[in-house]
């Protein structure tokens, strides 16, 4: 089956939008967040219009419908990620998911001198919690460098860093470079030395089907909003034996069995880690997003995105002064094209692109150690997804050329 | 500057020049030109933590002082040309005014110039942060 991009685009009302200056929106900021198909918007509206109610702990019809929808979304989402609903803990996103591993697993199981291995490619969400753990309990944080020629992890250095490691935390796909790391090899080698492994799949999940059980990994952090779902929700997938080693880092309602003035007992499994009113509308919206994605072969989706990114990068390289960071032409690249112009400052370039209707992101992309390794303070980044077209890419390249002709 | 004026008379020519631009890209081209015409630039070697304008995605720095005639003077520098151009126009607008007047100024000239995208607070492009910093410094210099 070939992707019908026109039909896909018709599912996204925002893609018809014109900006205040009359320009048609060309949305190339998908690594920051994807747009949402109508079915996701409708599912969330329907919840609020028809059965808005707090989930769990009630016997009325609306609460029953809300609970069924919330747990039904968990079933669908966990199944999409190749695991059972018992292994999935709803969080506010990938950031909270990683923090739950830091505060719920690491603080309970690691102590002074224990080693956590990160990479220079990590998003701040997978750096700062570990730096905080270093302050709180004295863990040692090691960083695997990147090879700035190939834009890949230095796997020799990774093997050295593994010595004595208790936990390895690696980004599946870099939000800056679009590089997909060899996570299968990383998991295998890390577990061979007895380390648990966390993979940050915030960028990976929109581009390939993450199969949690097959990966045999301990923790996977996922964010809904980069894969057609709403903001404010994500999850951590946790292997059964790892979950048994975790304690809740947020406590309160819902996660308890019994509360007395003397103390409380907690629920078991994922329920222990989900306190307070759940993100019901968001979970329902994410479930609808997953149902929408299930109609596609993600390998075809990846190929489509990769074709656009690869073509765009190759044409951009012909524009004088443009330098691309990463190798979007590689088969395993995820469709992010980070670039700079040698004389047009990145923020200026982003504003000028915006005048043409092109939404790209500018800045350090919450990856300052990677920026340091690349020797730049920021980049511009065009990132593509399922609904982008080669026509959009062509107009982008032409417009970029015009900007360079006029402003360089 | 008269009480009923939103910016000094000598800036009218600059504002009109921007208003005469065919489209926004031409306005940005003109702003790039003005970036090179800063009457009192702050070169990168003088950029430090104290004079950095915070909240900008790009690097922007300003210093403000009162000259021998009691007039407000600002020196500014930024790595982004759009911010640098707005700094130039701002310096043309404010330099020589009383610090008290600067402290109560609004950036109406930038709005009149049609640089709308620089005037949205949610865009981290620095102009409004820079203007706020200049007004705060002017307020301190007024004392």
Image: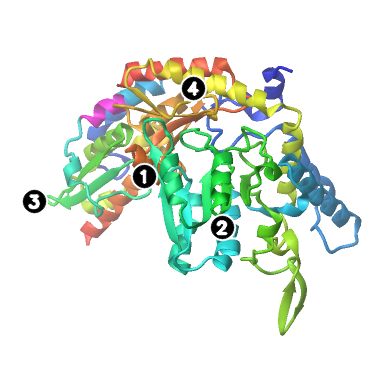
The mark found on residue A142 in the picture is none
Which residue corresponds to mark 2?
A: A99
The mark closer to the camera, 1 or 4, is: 4
**Quick one: label 4, few (<14), some, or many (20+) residues within 10 Å?**
some
**Quick one: label 1, few (<14), some, or many (20+) residues within 10 Å?**
some
What segment carries the magenta color? B30-36
Q: Position of residue B115 (x, y in %)?
A: 39, 31
Taking the view exactly as shown, the residue that stands out farthest to the left is B68
Position of the N terminus of chain A by quadrant: top right
Which residue corresponds to mark 1?
A: B56
Q: Earlier in the sequence, mark 4 or mark 2?
A: 2
Q: Position of residue A354 (x, y in %)?
A: 46, 28
In which quarter of the view is residue A308 placed? Answer: top right
SS at mark 2?
helix
Picture residue at 61% right of the left edge, 32% below the top = A207
Which residue corresponds to mark 3?
A: B68
The mark closer to the camera, 4 or 3, is: 4
């Amino acid at each position: 089956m070939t992707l019908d991009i026109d039909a896909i685009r018709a599912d996204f009302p925002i893609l018809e939008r014109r900006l205040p200056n009359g320009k048609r929106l060309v949305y190339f900021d998908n690594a920051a967040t994807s747009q949402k198909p109508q079915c996701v918007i409708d599912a969330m509206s329907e919840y609020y219009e028809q059965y808005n109610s707090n989930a769990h702990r009630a016997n009325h019809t609306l609460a029953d419908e809300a609970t069924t929808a919330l747990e039904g979304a968990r079933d669908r989402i966990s199944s999409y990620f190749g695991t059972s609903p018992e292994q999935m803990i709803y969080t506010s996103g990938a950031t909270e998911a990683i923090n739950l591993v830091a505060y719920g697993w690491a603080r309970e199981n690691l102590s002074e001198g224990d080693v956590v291995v990160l990479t220079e490619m990590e998003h701040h969400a997978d750096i700062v919690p570990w730096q905080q753990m270093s302050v709180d309990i004295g863990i040692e944080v090691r960083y695997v460098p990147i090879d700035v020629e190939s834009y890949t992890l230095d796997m020799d250095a990774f093997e050295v860093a593994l010595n004595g490691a208790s936990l390895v935390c690696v980004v599946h796909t870099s939000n800056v470079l679009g590089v997909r790391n060899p996570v299968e090899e990383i998991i295998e080698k890390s577990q061979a030395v007895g380390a648990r492994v966390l993979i940050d799949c915030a960028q990976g999940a929109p581009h390939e089907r993450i199969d949690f059980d097959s990966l045999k990994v301990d923790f996977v952090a996922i964010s809904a909003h980069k894969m057609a779902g709403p903001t404010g929700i994500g999850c951590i997938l946790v292997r059964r034996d790892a979950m048994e080693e975790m304690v809740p880092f947020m406590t309160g309602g819902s996660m308890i069995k019994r509360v007395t003035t003397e103390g409380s007992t907690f629920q078991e499994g994922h329920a222990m880690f989900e306190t307070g009113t759940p993100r019901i509308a968001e979970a329902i919206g994410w479930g609808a997003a997953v149902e929408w994605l299930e109609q596609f072969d993600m390998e075809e989706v990846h190929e489509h995105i990769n074709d656009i990114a690869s073509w765009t990068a190759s044409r951009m390289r012909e524009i004088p002064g443009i330098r691309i960071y990463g190798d979007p032409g590689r088969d395993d690249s995820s469709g992010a094209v980070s670039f700079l112009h040698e004389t047009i400052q990145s923020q200026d370039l982003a504003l000028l692109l915006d005048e043409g209707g092109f939404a790209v992101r500018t800045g350090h992309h919450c990856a300052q150690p990677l920026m340091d390794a690349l020797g730049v303070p920021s980049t511009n980044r065009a990132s593509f997804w399922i609904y982008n077209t080669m026509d959009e890419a062509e107009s982008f390249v032409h417009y970029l050329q015009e900007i360079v002709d006029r402003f360089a | 500057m008269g009480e009923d004026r939103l910016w000094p008379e000598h800036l009218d020519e600059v504002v009109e020049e921007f208003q005469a631009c065919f489209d926004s890209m031409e306005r940005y081209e003109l702003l790039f030109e003005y970036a090179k015409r800063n009457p009192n630039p702050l070169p990168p070697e003088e950029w430090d933590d104290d004079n950095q304008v915070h909240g900008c995605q790009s690097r922007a720095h300003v210093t403000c002082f009162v000259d021998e005639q009691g007039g407000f003077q600002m020196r500014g520098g930024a790595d982004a040309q759009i911010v640098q151009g707005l700094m130039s126009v701002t310096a043309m607008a404010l330099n020589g005014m009383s610090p008290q007047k600067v402290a109560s100024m609004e950036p109406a000239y930038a709005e009149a110039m049609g640089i709308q995208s620089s005037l949205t607070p949610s865009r981290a492009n620095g102009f409004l942060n820079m203007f706020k910093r200049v007004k705060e410094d002017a307020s301190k210099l007024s004392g």
